Image (cartoon, rainbow, N blue to C red):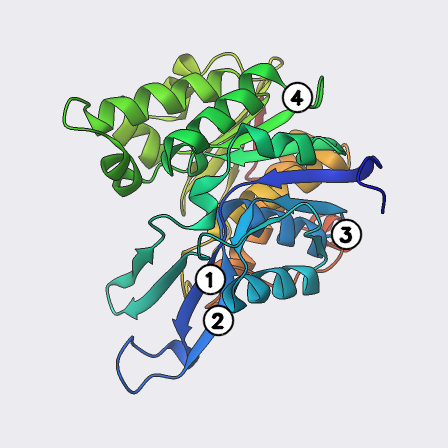
Amino acid sequence: MNRNDTITTDVLTVGETMVMVTPQAGGRLDAESSFVLRPGGAESNVAALLAELGHRTHWAGALGTDRLGDIVTTVLSGHGVDTSLVRRDPGRPTGVYFKDPTPHGTEVAYYRADSAATGVDTADLETWTRAAPRLVHLSGVLPALSPSCSDLTRRMVFDRPWDKTPVSFDVNHRPVLWQRMSDARTDPHRQAADTLLDLAQHCDIVFVGRDEAAELWGTTDAESVRTLIDKPEHLVVKDAAVEAVSFTGTGTARVPSRRVHVVDPVGAGDAFAAGWLSGWLHGQDEILRLRLGHYAAAQVLASASDLATLPPAHEVIALLEDEDTSNSQVST
């Protein structure tokens, strides 16, 4: 492909992807464990799950020129994600994180300092704007990685290098990242709250957990989140095992969460975003978008991986259309 050729795609996601190291068969992280290596990153998770649902997706970011970087591109390509926009950095390694499933929940240890992903900057846009996506998807992880990543995120959200292409944003608050990036004169919580709110207000589609919104901004329910984040065309507030609520300019839709046996909660939010965005790409109504989000999240919750094998979206839509929707609500 010529370097200047335009790349047509449904969704371009931009962000950090590391190698996830997790014990096999639900074991603990110890000296006797056998491990599986898989990609782990909010934006590439969304790209992979959207590809599983039948959409053409690209993930853009940076990896080291190491074997771990090869694992990321190979596995994502296996899920159907195009990784041709990924920059390989010979001077920085691919980040790694370890999952330790415990009886009280999954604990995670990250090793991402000075990784290739922390070195992305606005210069990378020269390559990435070759893409002509229907949608760009970002998350709040990227601006917390480094000052250059923060500048890049703001450029993508405020300057819109893809012109009128809608931008989707998952708040994805990670307090530890903000603590590491802040200096002694900066309150990391205030920096995160102000930055993430500013970014959310300038995006077209926003996903946020009710709990993380409460932690960041002191909101109490989905309606108070909408009062605060009032500019996006679509705001989706996820309330874990309770419900998801979607706000638009014409009304509010709410759908209860699906009942599922939870194996590992990590990645469920990314799966929800992928399901909802698939419904948006297919032009489905708000109720079905929320139900698609719940469906995709349930598949990941029941898996030890951040990803899951999903049928094409049209098959999921047909399945959901046959289910009872009496507990879903729409108001104007």
| 131 lies left or right of 17 | right
The secondary element bearing badge 2 is classed as strand
| 194 lies left or right of 297 | left
The secondary element bearing badge 1 is classed as strand
Location of mark 1 (residue): 19
Q: Amino acid at mark 4?
A: Pro
Location of mark 2 (residue): 37
Which sits earlier in the primary sequence, circle 1 or circle 4? 1
Location of mark 4 (residue): 161
- Image quadrant in which the C terminus is located: top right
Residue 201 in sight in this render: yes
Pick out the residue farthest to the front: 91
Q: CA distance from mark 3 to mark 2?
A: 25 Å
Quarter assignment of residue 122: top right
Density class for disc 3 (Cα within 10 Å; few <14, some 14-19, many ≥20) is some
Which sits earlier in the primary sequence, circle 1 or circle 2? 1
Location of mark 3 (residue): 54
The image shows residue 128 at horizontal and vertical percentages of 67, 35
